[in-house]
Image (cartoon, rainbow, N blue to C red):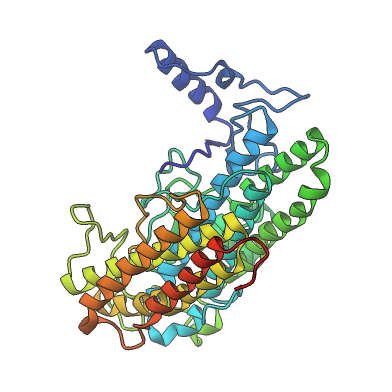
């Protein structure tokens, strides 16, 4: 699924976008007239206008407004935020599992933290949860979908791949987590300029990823606009302003500083090896394994994992990944803590076991998108049936791969999951207010 956050490079893309739309119109492609409203209006935000959320000449891409109605625009922006948080989460996970044991201090244990990769990924999962809760508070459905890799920079503010941790991938993470204007060489001291020069070399001439904070600036602006235009929403929605500001701050401070330390090899996990990224990729001292870029477990697709042993386990890891997201979608839709708890058990149990094992086979967790989507059944009972089918599918494959499973894989977890889902199913059949 292609994301729809449009970006214009330093404002120069306005005329290009207009020409593109006019060309489509000339070819008979129907386009709403509002899309041609690209002139600035000081009184109201219009489709085609850039959000004015950064200092002048900040040297970044700008997010373009698509809808004049603040409710429509807010839903659009929040859905894109969920896709971005999801995409960052899986990239950080993949990078974490590519790190060699000697540098395990960079990886961490999986508890939310701004000091290790798994901790940052866990925080991105919390951000994904919170943004989905805002969607639900607005009366919209949660969104667990993300674009497949590689992400296309023409329609998305990030130029990213699912790839092992390298100096180049870290440079992109540093850049996108940074606050607007924080990487301006004109405001830096000598030490900062050396860091920025190294960052610029690692990023190369490619399109710069947009800053995540830019999107949250647009969301906060539109949320305030919507609250002001919709009487009766203030008490319900105003608390989310502080939570969204916290998400933005956690990225621009904690996550940015963490990725900067890893990029510069000054993090404690390097154990004093500040030259680690200068080693050859085949050097034992290099921090990560040369895992494949954008691997997939889908037969017939490009970048299919070639090792047959790894391919079966990679598909099993996909099943667990999808189960985690299906459970997360259920927890957001129903505000159900038990679904969220089951998702954490899946994440810290079988998924983590496989994610740590696959690099030993020269592969990584593919984290493929689920073709059915993550909310295929809107009813509670339908959701339980779909989840139960996914658990049985996962258990069936695990049984076939029994001899290949890592030693710490929790073989009996599937039955525990099915029992919990059966309890949920039984609760639906009981009269309201009657205990089991």
State the count of labels: 0
Q: Nearer the viewer, residue 164 or 418?
A: 418
Q: Nearer the viewer, residue 149 or 432?
A: 432
The quadrant the C terminus occupies is bottom right
Q: Nearer the viewer, residue 140 or 384?
A: 384
Residue appearing at x 50%, y 79% in the figure? 106
Q: Nearer the viewer, residue 138 or 250?
A: 138
Q: Name the spot of residue 360 as percent of width and height, x first.
A: 28, 80
Q: Name the spot of residue 414 as percent of width and height, x first.
A: 38, 76
Q: Is residue 12 above or below residue 24?
A: below
> Does the image show residue 152?
yes
Residue appearing at x 23%, y 72% in the figure? 310
Residue appearing at x 63%, y 64% in the figure? 192
Q: Give the quadrant of residue 282.
A: bottom left
Residue appearing at x 45%, y 63% in the figure? 90
Q: Name the spot of residue 334 as percent of width and height, x first.
A: 59, 57
Q: Name the spot of residue 317 as percent of width and height, x first.
A: 34, 69
Tell me if 276 is positioned left or right of 83 in this view.
Answer: left
The quadrant the N terminus occupies is top left
> Does the image show residue 163?
no
Tell me if 382 is positioned left or right of 182 in this view.
Answer: left
Q: Is residue 231 above or below residue 243?
A: above
């Amino acid at each position: 699924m292609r994301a729809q956050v449009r970006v214009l490079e330093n404002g120069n893309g306005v005329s290009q976008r207009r020409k593109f739309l006019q060309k489509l119109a000339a070819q008979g492609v129907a386009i709403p007239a509002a899309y041609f409203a690209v002139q600035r209006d000081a009184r109201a935000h219009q489709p085609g206008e850039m959000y004015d959320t950064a200092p002048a000449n900040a040297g970044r891409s700008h997010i373009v407004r698509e809808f004049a109605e603040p409710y429509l625009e807010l839903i659009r922006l929040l859905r894109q935020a969920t896709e971005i948080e999801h995409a960052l989460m899986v990239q950080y996970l993949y990078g974490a599992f590519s790190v060699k044991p000697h540098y395990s201090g960079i990886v961490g244990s999986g508890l939310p933290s701004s000091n290790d990769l798994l901790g940052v990924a866990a925080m991105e999962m919390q951000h994904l949860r919170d943004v989905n809760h805002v969607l639900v508070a607005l009366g919209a459905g949660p969104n667990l979908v993300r674009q497949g890799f590689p992400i296309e920079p023409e329609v998305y503010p990030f130029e990213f791949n699912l790839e092992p941790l390298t100096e180049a991938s870290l440079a992109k993470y540093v850049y996108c987590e940074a606050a607007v204007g924080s990487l301006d060489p004109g405001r830096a001291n000598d030490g900062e300029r050396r860091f920025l020069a190294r960052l610029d070399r690692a990023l190369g001439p490619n399109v710069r990823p947009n800053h995540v904070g830019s999107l949250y600036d647009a969301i906060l602006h539109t949320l305030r606009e919507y609250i002001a235009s919709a009487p009766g929403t203030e008490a319900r929605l105003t608390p989310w302003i502080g939570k969204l500001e916290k998400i933005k701050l956690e990225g621009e401070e904690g996550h940015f500083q963490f990725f900067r330390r890893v990029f510069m090899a000054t993090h404690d996990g390097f154990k004093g090896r500040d030259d680690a990224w200068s080693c050859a990729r085949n050097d034992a001292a290099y921090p990560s394994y040369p895992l494949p870029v954008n691997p997939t477990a889908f037969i017939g697709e490009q970048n299919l994992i070639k090792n047959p042993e790894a391919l079966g386990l990679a598909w099993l890891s996909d099943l667990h990944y999808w189960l985690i997201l299906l459970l997360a979608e259920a927890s957001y839709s129903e505000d159900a803590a038990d679904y969220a708890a089951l998702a954490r058990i899946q994440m810290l149990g079988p998924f983590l076991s496989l994610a740590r094992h696959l690099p030993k086979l020269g592969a990584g967790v593919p984290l493929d998108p689920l073709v059915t989507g993550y909310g295929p059944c809107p009813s509670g009972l339908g959701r339980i049936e779909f989840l139960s089918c996914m658990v049985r599918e996962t258990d069936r494959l695990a049984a076939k791969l029994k001899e290949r499973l890592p030693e710490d894989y929790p073989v009996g977890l599937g039955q525990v999951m099915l029992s919990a889902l059966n309890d949920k199913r039984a609760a639906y059949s009981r009269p309201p207010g009657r205990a089991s």
